[in-house]
Amino acid sequence: MITDLPLLTAERTGDLRERVYSLREHWIARGGDPPAFLTLGTPSYLDMAERPETDNYERHGVGSRPLLWKHFQDLYDLVGDALQDHLDAPVHYADHLALPGFHIWLEAAIFTRPQAPVHFDLQYQAFDWPQGTDTDRLLSFTLPLRVPVAGGGLNLWEATYQEFRRALARGWVESAADLQRFHPRKYVPYTPGHLYLHSGHVLHQVAPSSAVHPGDERLTLQGHGVWCDGRWLLYW
């Protein structure tokens, strides 16, 4: 259901965190006053799937590719190589889409109750994919660089998007979150420097931390992939 690939040393994660903070002027506030949930880069689930009428994805996401590539090419190469080895297939970053980017949760945005949405990763549906794309073959990945002192991770349920569609058609559920009634929850704790990989079509949720400590943060690299004509295309 989820794969855990050790990837970075503690020293390397610390260096990457410093690079993210060196680009603070390019962070995008995603809510709160003062802002405490921010992104470096542009996630399609916020700026394409939810608000396709704006040009935010094009301006901030695709437009930020040179900046992110300049400062994190070594990270993109490392993640791409790790995925290529694990998946035993070519991996490329989609030229016309945003590069995988960073979620930044500062202390005020870290929550201790399960308030994040329970969902499947369906943002790929907002794009027109070229011929040869198989949208049943998907992946989502997270690379935590920093988690709160009390821990951070992911909640998972062994429920698939196909199962949800069948249950919805039969009137058994009204939303993806309703599937929680039928499946036990599994908590996956994050270790900084490890790459966590799943299909995106498994029901999941950002897990709360058990406590919030001064200076806490949750900093992760996020990305997705779609199988297209014999290779994986990565994007955010």
Image (tube, rainbow, N blue to C red):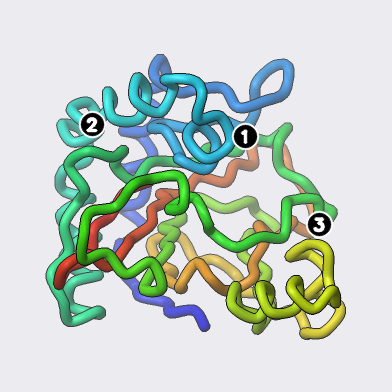
Q: Residues within 10 Å of mark 1 (few under 14, many from 20)?
A: some
Q: Where in the figure is residue 135, as x and y percent of width and height? A: 38, 66
Q: Is residue 132 left or right of residue 37?
A: left
Q: Amino acid at mark 1?
A: Leu
Image quadrant where residue 55 sits: top left
Q: Amino acid at mark 3?
A: Pro
Residue shown at the point (35%, 75%) measured from the top left: 5
Q: Is 228 rendered above or below residue 158?
A: above
In this rendering, does residue 213 appear at all? Answer: yes
Disc 2 to disc 3, C-alpha distance: 33 Å
Q: Amino acid at mark 2?
A: Arg
Which of the two labelled residues, at mark 3 and mark 1, occupies the earlier sequence position?
1
Viewer-closest of 77 and 135: 135
Residue shown at the point (16%, 76%) measured from the top left: 89
Query: Which label is found at residue 65?
Result: 2
Q: Which residue is mark 3?
A: 114
The secondary structure type at the circle numbered 3 is loop
The secondary structure type at the circle numbered 2 is helix
Image quadrant where residue 59 sits: top left
Q: Which residue is mark 1?
A: 106
Q: Where in the figure is residue 233, as x and y percent of width and height? A: 24, 58
Viewer-closest of 99 and 213: 99
In this rendering, does residue 151 appear at all? Answer: no
Which of the two labelled residues, at mark 2 and mark 1, occupies the earlier sequence position?
2
